[in-house]
Structures are given as C-alpha cells and as structure tokens.
Image (cartoon, rainbow, N blue to C red):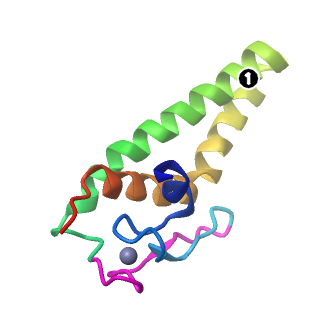
C-alpha cells in the first residue's frame, strides 16, 4: 500500500528501507535527518540538486490543511475565545513541523518516482 509506505517513510523503490535516519522532534526543535541513499536498494533519494524545493509546496499545503482543521474544530465545535483559537492554531503549526517535513518530502518523492 503506497499511502502506508508514505506515512512510514519507506523508500519509493524497494518499500523496505527507511528514508529518514531520525524522526526529529518539534518540541526540541530537532529536524528529521534524511539518508542520501536507501540502505536496502541504494536508491538515490535526491534525484537531482534542489529536488526537494518542490516539497515546500506540499509542506505548505499540509500546514494549511492542519491549521484550517484546527481552526474549524476550535471555533465551530469547542467555541473557545479567539485568543485560544489563535494559540492552538499556532501551536498546531509548530508541533507538526517535523512531521510535515518528513511527510512532504516523502510525498514529493513518491510523486516523481520513476522505476530505473
Ligand atoms: Zn530502497
């Protein structure tokens, strides 16, 4: 299943090797560390220099979706004051940054994966 492999951060070529050597931690401001090649099949993750610039658009879309979802939940369902809505939307954006970094790069790789 492709969707499961994307969430697990598996190599788009062999679907077994891990793309990231560490998951990162948003609370400790530690970004995930990415491997250059797959340990299992030697697939080169960065196909060309600057390949992952495009992943920023995926990351932006993910962050927007999460922030809108957070806003809708806090505003329409929980009905909390606007200050707390703002704080929860900002904290969602900060806390999901490492997760979005991993997910956006993995989605970008799967989008442009060609069997070599
Ligand atoms: Zn692989």
Query: Would you place residue 80 above or below residue 62 in this image?
Result: above
Q: Which residue is drawn at 48% across and 40% down?
A: 62
- Mark 1 neighbour density, 10 Å: few (under 14) some (14–19) many (20 or more): some
- Circle 1 sits in a helix, a strand or a loop, which is it? helix
Residue 114: which quarter of the image? Answer: bottom left
Q: In this view, does 53 lie to the left or right of 105?
A: left
User: In the image, residue 17 lies at what x, y percent?
Assistant: 46, 77
User: In the image, residue 5 lies at what x, y percent?
Assistant: 51, 59
Q: In this view, does 32 lie to the left or right of 13?
A: right
Query: Would you place residue 55 above or below residue 38 in this image?
Result: above
Q: Name the residue carrying label 1.
A: 73
Please say whether residue 24 is one of the residues in the magenta stretch.
no
Q: Residue at x 51, y 40 (%)?
A: 63
User: In the image, residue 64 lies at what x, y percent?
Assistant: 49, 33
Q: Is residue 12 left or right of residue 44?
A: right
Which of the four quarters of the rendered structure image does ligand 1 lie in?
bottom left
Give the overall secondary structure of the magenta segment.
Answer: loop
What residue range appears in magenta?
A: 28-43
Q: Residue at x 34, y 54 (%)?
A: 110
Of residues 47 and 66, the one nearer the viewer is 47
User: In the image, residue 96 lies at what x, y percent?
Assistant: 60, 51
């Amino acid at each position: 299943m492709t969707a499961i492999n994307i969430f697990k951060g598996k190599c788009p070529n062999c679907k077994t090797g891990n793309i990231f050597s560490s998951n990162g931690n948003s609370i400790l401001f530690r970004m995930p560390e990415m491997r250059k090649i797959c340990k299992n099949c030697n697939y080169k993750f960065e196909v060309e220099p600057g390949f992952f610039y495009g992943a920023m658009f995926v990351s932006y879309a993910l962050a927007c979706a999460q922030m809108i979802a957070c806003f809708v939940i806090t505003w329409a369902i929980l009905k909390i004051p606007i200050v707390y809505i703002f704080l929860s939307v900002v904290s969602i954006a900060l806390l999901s940054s490492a997760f979005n970094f991993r997910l956006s790069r993995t989605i970008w790789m799967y989008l442009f994966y060609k069997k070599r």
